[in-house]
Protein backbone atom coordinates (compact mmCIF):
# COMPACT_ATOMS: atom_id res chain seq x y z
CA UNK A 1 0.00 0.00 0.00
CA UNK A 2 1.44 3.38 -1.00
CA UNK A 3 1.98 5.62 1.98
CA UNK A 4 0.28 8.97 1.53
CA UNK A 5 2.70 11.88 1.84
CA UNK A 6 1.86 14.81 4.13
CA UNK A 7 0.21 17.77 2.42
CA UNK A 8 2.60 20.70 2.62
CA UNK A 9 1.09 24.04 3.56
CA UNK A 10 2.35 27.52 4.34
CA UNK A 11 2.67 26.37 7.95
CA UNK A 12 2.76 22.79 9.10
CA UNK A 13 1.74 19.59 7.36
CA UNK A 14 -1.37 17.40 7.34
CA UNK A 15 -1.39 13.67 6.59
CA UNK A 16 -4.41 11.41 6.11
CA UNK A 17 -3.93 8.17 8.02
CA UNK A 18 -5.06 4.69 6.88
CA UNK A 19 -7.85 4.96 9.46
CA UNK A 20 -9.27 7.94 7.55
CA UNK A 21 -8.37 10.40 10.30
CA UNK A 22 -5.93 13.32 9.87
CA UNK A 23 -2.61 13.91 11.56
CA UNK A 24 -1.11 17.41 11.84
CA UNK A 25 2.50 18.44 12.52
CA UNK A 26 4.61 21.59 12.39
CA UNK A 27 8.21 22.74 12.75
CA UNK A 28 8.60 24.77 15.94
CA UNK A 29 10.93 27.70 16.56
CA UNK A 30 13.37 25.21 18.12
CA UNK A 31 13.51 23.43 14.71
CA UNK A 32 11.92 20.30 16.20
CA UNK A 33 8.91 18.85 14.38
CA UNK A 34 5.90 18.56 16.67
CA UNK A 35 2.95 16.24 16.01
CA UNK A 36 -0.53 16.91 17.37
CA UNK A 37 -1.26 14.74 20.44
CA UNK A 38 -4.50 13.57 18.84
CA UNK A 39 -5.73 12.82 15.34
CA UNK A 40 -8.67 14.64 13.75
CA UNK A 41 -11.96 13.70 12.10
CA UNK A 42 -11.58 16.20 9.27
CA UNK A 43 -8.86 18.16 7.48
CA UNK A 44 -10.49 21.39 8.68
CA UNK A 45 -10.04 20.31 12.31
CA UNK A 46 -6.36 19.61 11.67
CA UNK A 47 -5.93 22.99 9.97
CA UNK A 48 -7.62 24.68 12.93
CA UNK A 49 -5.14 23.10 15.33
CA UNK A 50 -2.21 24.25 13.18
CA UNK A 51 -3.65 27.77 13.01
CA UNK A 52 -3.72 27.89 16.82
CA UNK A 53 -0.07 26.81 17.02
CA UNK A 54 0.95 29.41 14.39
CA UNK A 55 -0.89 32.11 16.35
CA UNK A 56 1.03 31.13 19.50
CA UNK A 57 4.35 31.34 17.66
CA UNK A 58 3.71 34.71 16.01
CA UNK A 59 2.34 36.15 19.25
CA UNK A 60 5.34 35.04 21.27
CA UNK A 61 3.20 32.73 23.47
CA UNK A 62 4.61 29.46 22.20
CA UNK A 63 6.52 27.18 24.57
CA UNK A 64 7.87 23.71 23.81
CA UNK A 65 5.20 21.13 24.74
CA UNK A 66 6.10 19.14 27.84
CA UNK A 67 6.65 15.53 26.89
CA UNK A 68 4.20 13.55 29.00
CA UNK A 69 4.69 10.00 30.08
CA UNK A 70 2.59 7.76 27.82
CA UNK A 71 -0.74 6.74 29.30
CA UNK A 72 -0.55 3.09 30.30
CA UNK A 73 -3.26 0.49 29.93
CA UNK A 74 -3.32 0.06 33.70
CA UNK A 75 -3.98 3.77 34.28
CA UNK A 76 -6.73 3.85 31.70
CA UNK A 77 -8.32 0.63 33.00
CA UNK A 78 -8.49 2.07 36.52
CA UNK A 79 -10.12 5.22 35.19
CA UNK A 80 -12.57 3.15 33.13
CA UNK A 81 -13.57 0.99 36.10
CA UNK A 82 -13.98 4.01 38.39
CA UNK A 83 -16.17 5.98 36.00
CA UNK A 84 -18.27 3.10 34.69
CA UNK A 85 -21.82 2.80 36.12
CA UNK A 86 -21.77 -0.84 37.23
CA UNK A 87 -23.68 -2.97 39.69
CA UNK A 88 -21.61 -3.87 42.78
CA UNK A 89 -21.29 -7.54 41.87
CA UNK A 90 -20.25 -6.72 38.30
CA UNK A 91 -17.71 -4.18 39.56
CA UNK A 92 -16.26 -6.76 41.94
CA UNK A 93 -16.05 -9.32 39.12
CA UNK A 94 -14.29 -6.84 36.82
CA UNK A 95 -11.88 -5.95 39.62
CA UNK A 96 -11.00 -9.61 40.01
CA UNK A 97 -10.54 -10.10 36.26
CA UNK A 98 -8.26 -7.07 36.02
CA UNK A 99 -6.14 -8.03 39.01
CA UNK A 100 -5.81 -11.72 38.25
CA UNK A 101 -6.00 -12.03 34.45
CA UNK A 102 -5.27 -8.73 32.70
CA UNK A 103 -3.07 -6.30 34.64
CA UNK A 104 -0.22 -8.76 35.28
CA UNK A 105 0.46 -8.50 31.53
CA UNK A 106 -0.82 -5.06 30.54
CA UNK A 107 -0.57 -2.79 33.59
CA UNK A 108 2.61 -0.95 32.59
CA UNK A 109 2.16 -1.25 28.81
CA UNK A 110 1.51 2.07 27.06
CA UNK A 111 -2.07 2.17 25.81
CA UNK A 112 -0.89 2.82 22.26
CA UNK A 113 1.53 -0.11 22.49
CA UNK A 114 -1.19 -2.72 23.01
CA UNK A 115 -1.07 -4.53 19.67
CA UNK A 116 -3.03 -7.45 18.19
CA UNK A 117 0.06 -9.65 18.60
CA UNK A 118 0.39 -8.74 22.28
CA UNK A 119 -3.29 -9.44 22.88
CA UNK A 120 -3.02 -12.74 20.99
CA UNK A 121 -0.02 -13.89 23.05
CA UNK A 122 -1.77 -12.93 26.28
CA UNK A 123 -4.94 -14.77 25.28
CA UNK A 124 -2.99 -17.89 24.37
CA UNK A 125 -1.32 -17.75 27.77
CA UNK A 126 -4.74 -17.96 29.42
CA UNK A 127 -5.30 -21.41 27.92
CA UNK A 128 -5.23 -23.08 31.33
CA UNK A 129 -7.78 -20.72 32.87
CA UNK A 130 -11.44 -21.49 33.41
CA UNK A 131 -13.09 -21.08 29.95
CA UNK A 132 -15.72 -18.70 31.32
CA UNK A 133 -13.16 -16.55 33.15
CA UNK A 134 -11.00 -16.52 30.01
CA UNK A 135 -13.90 -15.33 27.87
CA UNK A 136 -14.92 -12.71 30.44
CA UNK A 137 -11.34 -11.42 30.68
CA UNK A 138 -11.12 -11.07 26.90
CA UNK A 139 -14.50 -9.35 26.77
CA UNK A 140 -13.39 -6.89 29.45
CA UNK A 141 -10.11 -5.89 27.82
CA UNK A 142 -11.93 -5.54 24.49
CA UNK A 143 -14.48 -3.21 26.11
CA UNK A 144 -11.80 -1.08 27.77
CA UNK A 145 -9.83 -0.70 24.56
CA UNK A 146 -13.02 -0.03 22.62
CA UNK A 147 -13.71 2.83 25.01
CA UNK A 148 -10.20 4.14 24.35
CA UNK A 149 -11.00 4.16 20.62
CA UNK A 150 -14.19 6.14 21.30
CA UNK A 151 -12.13 8.65 23.29
CA UNK A 152 -9.64 8.90 20.40
CA UNK A 153 -6.73 7.72 22.51
CA UNK A 154 -5.98 4.89 20.07
CA UNK A 155 -6.89 4.54 16.41
CA UNK A 156 -8.31 1.01 16.47
CA UNK A 157 -9.17 -1.81 18.86
CA UNK A 158 -6.47 -4.52 18.76
CA UNK A 159 -8.87 -7.15 20.11
CA UNK A 160 -10.29 -9.09 17.17
CA UNK A 161 -9.87 -12.77 18.03
CA UNK A 162 -13.04 -14.38 16.67
CA UNK A 163 -15.16 -16.04 19.34
CA UNK A 164 -12.76 -15.24 22.19
CA UNK A 165 -15.44 -13.41 24.15
CA UNK A 166 -17.77 -16.40 24.11
CA UNK A 167 -17.61 -19.52 26.23
CA UNK A 168 -19.42 -22.79 26.01
CA UNK A 169 -21.74 -23.50 28.92
CA UNK A 170 -19.91 -26.01 31.10
CA UNK A 171 -23.15 -27.12 32.75
CA UNK A 172 -25.79 -28.29 30.30
CA UNK A 173 -29.14 -27.41 31.80
CA UNK A 174 -31.79 -30.11 31.85
CA UNK A 175 -34.97 -28.52 33.22
CA UNK A 176 -36.77 -30.46 35.92
CA UNK A 177 -39.94 -32.27 34.91
CA UNK A 178 -43.13 -31.69 36.86
CA UNK A 179 -42.69 -35.06 38.55
CA UNK A 180 -39.11 -34.20 39.56
CA UNK A 181 -40.22 -30.80 40.82
CA UNK A 182 -42.93 -32.44 42.94
CA UNK A 183 -40.40 -34.90 44.42
CA UNK A 184 -37.92 -32.10 45.06
CA UNK A 185 -40.45 -29.98 46.95
CA UNK A 186 -41.65 -32.97 48.96
CA UNK A 187 -38.09 -33.64 50.14
CA UNK A 188 -37.51 -30.11 51.43
CA UNK A 189 -37.78 -29.73 55.21
CA UNK A 190 -39.98 -26.65 55.69
CA UNK A 191 -42.62 -24.47 54.05
CA UNK A 192 -40.06 -21.70 53.58
CA UNK A 193 -37.87 -23.78 51.27
CA UNK A 194 -40.85 -25.46 49.60
CA UNK A 195 -42.50 -22.17 48.63
CA UNK A 196 -39.21 -20.64 47.61
CA UNK A 197 -38.57 -23.56 45.27
CA UNK A 198 -42.07 -23.45 43.81
CA UNK A 199 -41.79 -19.72 43.05
CA UNK A 200 -38.34 -20.21 41.52
CA UNK A 201 -39.77 -22.83 39.16
CA UNK A 202 -43.27 -21.64 38.33
CA UNK A 203 -42.45 -17.91 38.26
CA UNK A 204 -38.89 -18.29 36.89
CA UNK A 205 -37.35 -16.11 39.61
CA UNK A 206 -33.66 -15.73 40.39
CA UNK A 207 -32.24 -16.50 43.84
CA UNK A 208 -31.32 -12.84 44.38
CA UNK A 209 -34.85 -11.76 43.48
CA UNK A 210 -36.44 -14.31 45.81
CA UNK A 211 -34.29 -13.47 48.82
CA UNK A 212 -35.08 -9.74 48.54
CA UNK A 213 -38.84 -10.26 48.20
CA UNK A 214 -40.80 -8.44 50.93
CA UNK A 215 -44.43 -8.57 51.99
CA UNK A 216 -45.18 -5.33 50.11
CA UNK A 217 -44.03 -6.95 46.85
CA UNK A 218 -46.78 -9.59 46.91
CA UNK A 219 -50.24 -8.66 45.63
CA UNK A 220 -52.39 -11.66 46.51
CA UNK A 221 -55.57 -9.91 45.37
CA UNK A 222 -54.35 -9.71 41.77
CA UNK A 223 -51.97 -12.64 42.00
CA UNK A 224 -48.83 -10.66 41.15
CA UNK A 225 -45.25 -10.55 42.41
CA UNK A 226 -43.60 -7.19 41.85
CA UNK A 227 -39.88 -7.57 41.20
CA UNK A 228 -38.18 -4.25 41.88
CA UNK A 229 -35.01 -5.20 43.74
CA UNK A 230 -32.50 -8.01 44.07
CA UNK A 231 -29.74 -8.84 46.51
CA UNK A 232 -26.26 -9.91 45.45
CA UNK A 233 -23.30 -11.15 47.47
CA UNK A 234 -20.21 -8.95 47.06
CA UNK A 235 -17.17 -10.14 48.99
CA UNK A 236 -19.47 -12.21 51.15
CA UNK A 237 -21.78 -9.33 52.10
CA UNK A 238 -25.34 -8.75 50.81
CA UNK A 239 -25.83 -5.69 48.60
CA UNK A 240 -29.35 -4.64 47.61
CA UNK A 241 -29.79 -3.13 44.18
CA UNK A 242 -31.98 -3.19 41.12
CA UNK A 243 -32.52 -6.46 39.22
CA UNK A 244 -29.91 -7.79 36.82
CA UNK A 245 -31.12 -5.63 33.90
CA UNK A 246 -33.62 -2.81 33.36
CA UNK A 247 -36.07 -5.40 32.05
CA UNK A 248 -35.65 -7.27 35.35
CA UNK A 249 -37.99 -4.81 37.07
CA UNK A 250 -41.27 -6.48 36.23
CA UNK A 251 -44.59 -7.84 37.47
CA UNK A 252 -44.87 -11.63 37.41
CA UNK A 253 -48.29 -13.25 37.57
CA UNK A 254 -48.50 -16.15 39.99
CA UNK A 255 -50.02 -19.40 38.70
CA UNK A 256 -53.35 -19.66 40.54
CA UNK A 257 -52.60 -23.10 41.97
CA UNK A 258 -49.79 -21.56 44.09
CA UNK A 259 -51.92 -18.81 45.65
CA UNK A 260 -53.43 -20.82 48.55
CA UNK A 261 -50.00 -21.93 49.76
CA UNK A 262 -48.60 -18.43 49.31
CA UNK A 263 -51.44 -16.79 51.26
CA UNK A 264 -51.08 -19.30 54.10
CA UNK A 265 -47.34 -18.69 54.25
CA UNK A 266 -47.78 -14.91 54.33
CA UNK A 267 -50.28 -15.19 57.16
CA UNK A 268 -48.07 -17.34 59.39
CA UNK A 269 -44.42 -16.62 58.61
CA UNK A 270 -43.80 -12.93 57.88
CA UNK A 271 -42.52 -10.55 60.55
CA UNK A 272 -41.55 -6.93 60.11
CA UNK A 273 -44.77 -5.75 58.49
CA UNK A 274 -44.82 -4.72 54.85
CA UNK A 275 -41.02 -4.60 54.74
CA UNK A 276 -40.61 -8.09 56.17
CA UNK A 277 -38.55 -10.50 54.06
CA UNK A 278 -40.39 -13.53 52.70
CA UNK A 279 -37.36 -15.80 52.89
CA UNK A 280 -34.95 -14.42 55.51
CA UNK A 281 -32.03 -16.04 57.28
CA UNK A 282 -32.58 -17.83 60.58
CA UNK A 283 -32.66 -14.54 62.52
CA UNK A 284 -35.75 -13.45 60.58
CA UNK A 285 -34.31 -10.13 59.39
CA UNK A 286 -31.07 -10.84 57.47
CA UNK A 287 -30.85 -12.00 53.87
CA UNK A 288 -30.56 -15.73 53.34
CA UNK A 289 -27.12 -16.83 52.19
CA UNK A 290 -26.89 -19.25 49.26
CA UNK A 291 -25.12 -21.77 51.50
CA UNK A 292 -28.17 -21.87 53.78
CA UNK A 293 -30.37 -22.96 50.92
CA UNK A 294 -27.82 -25.39 49.50
CA UNK A 295 -27.66 -27.35 52.75
CA UNK A 296 -31.24 -28.49 52.26
CA UNK A 297 -31.49 -28.25 48.46
CA UNK A 298 -28.65 -30.65 47.74
CA UNK A 299 -30.21 -33.39 49.86
CA UNK A 300 -33.63 -32.80 48.26
CA UNK A 301 -32.32 -33.01 44.70
CA UNK A 302 -30.67 -36.34 45.52
CA UNK A 303 -34.00 -37.61 46.82
CA UNK A 304 -35.68 -36.42 43.60
CA UNK A 305 -33.17 -38.31 41.47
CA UNK A 306 -31.65 -35.12 40.04
CA UNK A 307 -28.20 -34.71 41.63
CA UNK A 308 -27.21 -32.48 38.70
CA UNK A 309 -29.98 -29.93 39.29
CA UNK A 310 -28.89 -26.48 40.45
CA UNK A 311 -31.30 -24.07 42.12
CA UNK A 312 -30.90 -21.63 39.22
CA UNK A 313 -31.96 -24.42 36.85
CA UNK A 314 -35.46 -24.09 38.30
CA UNK A 315 -35.69 -20.76 36.50
CA UNK A 316 -35.04 -22.64 33.28
CA UNK A 317 -37.82 -25.06 34.23
CA UNK A 318 -40.23 -22.15 34.60
CA UNK A 319 -39.09 -20.59 31.34
CA UNK A 320 -39.63 -23.80 29.36
CA UNK A 321 -43.03 -24.39 30.97
CA UNK A 322 -44.07 -20.83 30.11
CA UNK A 323 -42.87 -21.31 26.53
CA UNK A 324 -44.82 -24.57 26.30
CA UNK A 325 -48.09 -22.69 26.85
CA UNK A 326 -47.55 -20.88 23.54
CA UNK A 327 -46.29 -17.62 25.06
CA UNK A 328 -44.95 -15.21 22.47
CA UNK A 329 -41.33 -14.11 22.45
CA UNK A 330 -42.29 -10.71 23.90
CA UNK A 331 -44.35 -12.37 26.64
CA UNK A 332 -41.47 -14.66 27.59
CA UNK A 333 -39.04 -11.74 27.70
CA UNK A 334 -41.42 -9.83 29.96
CA UNK A 335 -41.99 -12.74 32.34
CA UNK A 336 -38.30 -13.64 32.58
CA UNK A 337 -36.99 -10.09 32.73
CA UNK A 338 -34.86 -10.41 29.60
CA UNK A 339 -33.84 -7.32 27.64
CA UNK A 340 -32.80 -9.26 24.53
CA UNK A 341 -34.65 -12.06 22.71
CA UNK A 342 -31.77 -14.56 22.52
CA UNK A 343 -32.43 -16.40 25.80
CA UNK A 344 -36.20 -16.40 25.34
CA UNK A 345 -35.78 -17.96 21.89
CA UNK A 346 -33.70 -20.70 23.47
CA UNK A 347 -36.56 -21.58 25.80
CA UNK A 348 -39.05 -21.59 22.94
CA UNK A 349 -36.87 -24.07 21.07
CA UNK A 350 -36.46 -26.21 24.19
CA UNK A 351 -40.22 -26.29 24.68
CA UNK A 352 -40.77 -27.37 21.09
CA UNK A 353 -38.21 -30.13 21.48
CA UNK A 354 -39.97 -31.48 24.57
CA UNK A 355 -43.46 -31.06 23.17
CA UNK A 356 -44.60 -34.66 23.63
CA UNK A 357 -43.25 -34.83 27.17
CA UNK A 358 -44.84 -31.51 28.07
CA UNK A 359 -48.17 -32.50 26.56
CA UNK A 360 -48.28 -35.63 28.70
CA UNK A 361 -47.26 -33.68 31.80
CA UNK A 362 -49.92 -31.02 31.22
CA UNK A 363 -52.59 -33.69 30.91
CA UNK A 364 -51.52 -35.02 34.26
CA UNK A 365 -52.36 -31.65 35.79
CA UNK A 366 -56.01 -31.97 34.88
CA UNK A 367 -58.04 -33.21 37.80
CA UNK A 368 -60.15 -36.26 36.93
CA UNK A 369 -63.85 -35.58 36.70
CA UNK A 370 -65.89 -36.61 39.72
Image (tube, rainbow, N blue to C red):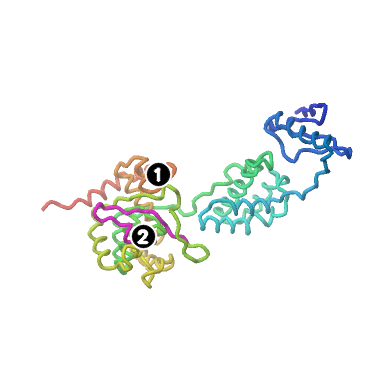
Find the magenta span and give its range.
Answer: 212-232
Dot 1 crowding, Cα within 10 Å, few <14, some 14–19, many 20+: many
Tell me residue 337's x, y (percent).
40, 48
Specify whether residue 213 is painted magenta: yes
Residue toward you, 163 or 37: 37
Residue 244 in the figure: left or right of residue 52: left
Where is residue 134? Give x, y as percent.
Answer: 59, 52
Report the disc number at residue 93: none
Residue 100 position within the rendered picture, expressed as x and y whole percent measured from the top left: 63, 59
Q: Quadrant of residue 207?
A: bottom left
155 relative to 212 in the view: left or right: right
> Outermost residue, right direction?
31
Q: CA distance from mark 1 to mark 2?
A: 24 Å
Q: Which residue is mark 2?
A: 213
Q: Quadrant of the N terminus?
A: top right
Q: Is residue 222 above or below residue 49?
A: below
Q: Is residue 177 left or right of residue 173?
A: left
| Residue at 43% over, 67% down | 291
Q: Is residue 158 above or below residue 238?
A: above
Residue highlighted by disc 1: 344
Q: Mark 2: few, some, or many residues within 10 Å (few <14, many ≥20)?
A: many
Is label 1 in contact with label 2 (beta carbons under 8 Å)?
Answer: no
Nearest to the observer: residue 86 or residue 328: 86
Amino acid sequence: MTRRKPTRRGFGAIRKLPSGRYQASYLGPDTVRRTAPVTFDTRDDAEGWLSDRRREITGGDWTPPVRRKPLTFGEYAERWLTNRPLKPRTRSHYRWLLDSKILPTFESVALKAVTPDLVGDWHSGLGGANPTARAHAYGLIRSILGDAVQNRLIDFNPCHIRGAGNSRRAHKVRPATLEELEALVAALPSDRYKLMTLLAAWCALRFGELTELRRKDIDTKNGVIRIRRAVARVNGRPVIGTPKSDAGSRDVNIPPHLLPALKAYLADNITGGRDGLLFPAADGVSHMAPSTLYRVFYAAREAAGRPDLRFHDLRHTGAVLAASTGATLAELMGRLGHSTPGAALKYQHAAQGRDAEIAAALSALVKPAD
